[in-house]
Amino acid sequence: MVVFFGGASFAVVGTVVAWSAFGGRASFDAGTTLGQAVAVGVYQGLVSVLTVGVAFAARHPAGARCRSWSRCCGRCRACSWGSAATRSRP
């Protein structure tokens, strides 16, 4: 929701900046401008959802592998790769 409103706000600000750059001589249809602002908000919202989803999908398996490797290596008494804090001392 935050990204949607941010994108729609930037689209409205962009329209205002474009209107002022033309010295007020440009005309913008309110319906078209509103539709484009909503479309920009929806697009940015979908991109943010896709980004978070891909990040979760990519990081979750890597994190699970890393945790299981550290647990295995940390509990192994003969393993020299485990840290001193996780290795059991004789």
Image (tube, grey):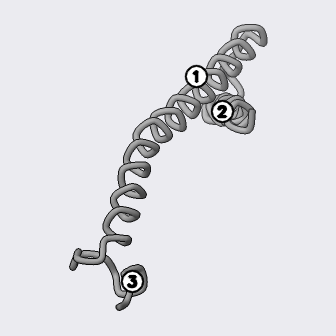
Q: Around disc 2, counting alpha carbons within 10 Å, would you say few (fewer than 14), some (14 to 19), or many (20 or more)?
A: many
Q: Is residue 45 above or below residue 72?
A: above
In-front residue for pair 90/57: 90
Residue at the spot 75% in from the left edge and 16% down from the top edge: 34
Residue at the spot 46% in from the left edge and 41% down from the top edge: 55
Compared across the picture, whether 81 is left or right of 7 comes to left
Q: Is residue 18 above or below residue 34?
A: below
The quadrant in which residue 87 appears is bottom left
In-front residue for pair 26/35: 35
Q: How many marks?
A: 3
Q: Earlier in the sequence, mark 2 or mark 1?
A: 2
- Residue under label 2, please give it: 7
**Circle nearer the viewer, 2 or 1:** 1
- Residue under label 3, please give it: 88
Q: Is residue 35 above or below residue 70?
A: above
Q: Earlier in the sequence, mark 3 or mark 1?
A: 1
**Residue 38's x, y, as percent?**
70, 19
Residue at the spot 35% in from the left edge and 87% down from the top edge: 84
Q: Earlier in the sequence, mark 2 or mark 3?
A: 2
Amino acid at the residue labelled 2: Gly
User: What quarter of the picture does the C terminus occupy?
Assistant: bottom left
Amino acid at the residue labelled 3: Ser
**Circle nearer the viewer, 2 or 3:** 3
**Circle nearer the viewer, 3 or 1:** 3
Residue at the limit of the structure toward the right, as seen here: 30
For numbered disc 2, what is the local secondary structure?
helix
Compared across the picture, whether 56 is left or right of 40 comes to left
- Residue under label 1, please give it: 43
Amino acid at the residue labelled 1: Tyr
Q: Around disc 1, counting alpha carbons within 10 Å, would you say few (fewer than 14), some (14 to 19), or many (20 or more)?
A: some
- The span from disc 3 to disc 1 (Cα, nearest Å) is 53 Å
